Amino acid sequence: MDKLFNQLSVCTDLIEEGNFGNISWLNEFCAEFHTFASNFKLYLPELAPRYDLYGNVKIHVETIFLCFTQVLTCISQLERIMNMEEDIGENTRFFITRSHFLNRIDWCVRRLHASLYQISEKVATSSNMKLEDLSFVELLDLSLDKLETYNEIVVENAPPAAAPVNPQDQLYNEVNQIVKHALAFANVALEADEKALRKICENILDECSVFQKNFDVLNAGDRKLEALSLQRALCSLETYLNEALLRLIITTLADVEENSVSSLKLRLHYFNNSDATAKLIANFDRNMDRIQQIGVIAIAFTEDVKTKTIVRSCLASMESLDSCIIPAFQLQTSSIGRRHADILKDHFIEEIAIFQNIIHEVIDSRALISSYLDMLADNINDAGKNYRKEPMLKIARMGKILSQHFCVKLNYQELSEDGKRIHLDFLAILRECLAVLELKIPINPKRIIKRLKVMYSVLSKLRDDVGRQEVLGSSCTDDNSSTVLNETFSNSRHSSFARKTDSIMHSETLGQETDLISFQLKKLLKIN
């Protein structure tokens, strides 16, 4: 462990020289960081015996993977900056741009040092994990498992089983944390979903308060009924949050594409103080908040270590850009200022592309199509009563998110041969709907609605094809019908947003993490 700390100290010393360093300096830093990461990879198996016992160890290991990814991201940006400086010549240095990425590397190296210290034998002895460190899904599983134990209490006058002091108080704290997660999401959700989520959260807190208050005076049967009622309330929260999340993903990704960061940069360069520009900035800030919440929930629902790390890294990059990208766009008054803005803009576009791709890999295809079909049906019904072109064009543009979803190889492979033909039909009708709606000349609303109905029909067939493939996949992998039933029941709570994945054993998880380090080291060697 001392060797790892020493190698990090060497990296810290090199970072201080980064403002004036060239490619040779970057290569030297990469070599030192590569040595540290390689040695950490060898050290990782030593954590295996403690990995499941101490939640704090898992948290710090995940933080280390995040820091690895962020350091590599910043190194690639520094390489680009240095190449740009070399092309310009005359000892040009983009000090502000360099500082942005060097500061991020410095933060990561210091965080690596802190995490290594935390997982050393001197500190990693606590088996108590704070509720604040648990995700929405982990808290939900914890609470539902606890409520399930109350459901099993059915015998009157049975001798009391050993139980922790005031278990209902612990449950109340867990439910409070669940509600905090849900309300954080509600703050950025679509307006209708925000109201519904707040109402569900109020109901859960009321149910939990009643359960806690009456816990000691209820008999076994009544306690079971109260526990079942609270279980239903929690499950309804998860179900609705899943559905609201899908709607938010479709809306946000479509809005990010329509109101691109490139157009925002151009607008701020030429029309810095207009009301329209202020609206664009507000829209950008709102989308950044939504992306953060989408990422947090995606991390909670996925079990894959690489996926979690990639999403965390994207969120970290966008969070660091959030505070400086708008000021950079507003200060394009010199050649250096414009190039600084270009670098941040391109970095943002890269991170958004990675984020969109990984979110599409996490999302369950059938659930995404179903969510869009519900939104499309509502718009078609509204258009039949009171036709307005703008919402119809907006919902059609959201359809491009589905086309992007099946551009991801993993999702396209879910389709049968018939499904692939239906997918081509969908792309054709989507292009036709967009072309008709984007025409400047007036078009008969009935013709537009008819085309949207055709798109609805085609997408319904595509959803059915995805559903059939899922059923076939399940029947091929499970011979025992009771096993299928049990897995369907256990997975049903999490199926509306995230793709179904097999549970990952502890040893496999460690193997994935070692592979993740190897993958990142290969990236580092390409730069070095």
Image (tube, rainbow, N blue to C red):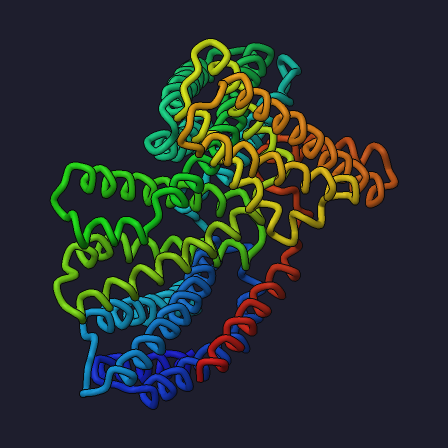
Examine the image and state in which quarter residue 85 appears.
Answer: bottom left
Foreground pick, 50 / 507: 507
Q: Residue at x 28, y 57 (%)?
A: 321
Q: Is residue 340 left or right of residue 371?
A: left
Taking 33 as reference, is 450 above or below it?
Answer: above
Q: Quadrant of the C terminus?
A: bottom left
Number of disc labels: 0
Furthest-right residue in view?
479
- Residue 140, horizontal then vertical, whole percent: 51, 34
Taking 210 as reference, is 469 above or below it?
Answer: below
Taking 134 as reference, is 167 above or below it?
Answer: above
Furthest-front residue in view?
441
Q: Quadrant of the N terminus?
A: bottom left
Q: Is residue 25 left or right of residue 40?
A: left
Examine the image and state in which quarter residue 329 appears.
Answer: bottom left
Q: Residue at x 34, y 54 (%)?
A: 318
Visible residue check, residue 205: no
Visible residue check, residue 343: yes
- Residue 479, horizontal then vertical, whole percent: 87, 41
Examine the image and state in which quarter residue 48 appears.
Answer: bottom right
Foreground pick, 290 / 143: 290
Taking 242 as reference, is 299 above or below it?
Answer: below
Q: Residue at x 43, y 35 (%)?
A: 251
- Residue 447, horizontal then vertical, whole percent: 55, 21
Foreground pick, 273 / 26: 273
- Residue 349, horizontal then vertical, whole percent: 38, 57
Q: Is residue 417 left or right of residue 212?
A: right
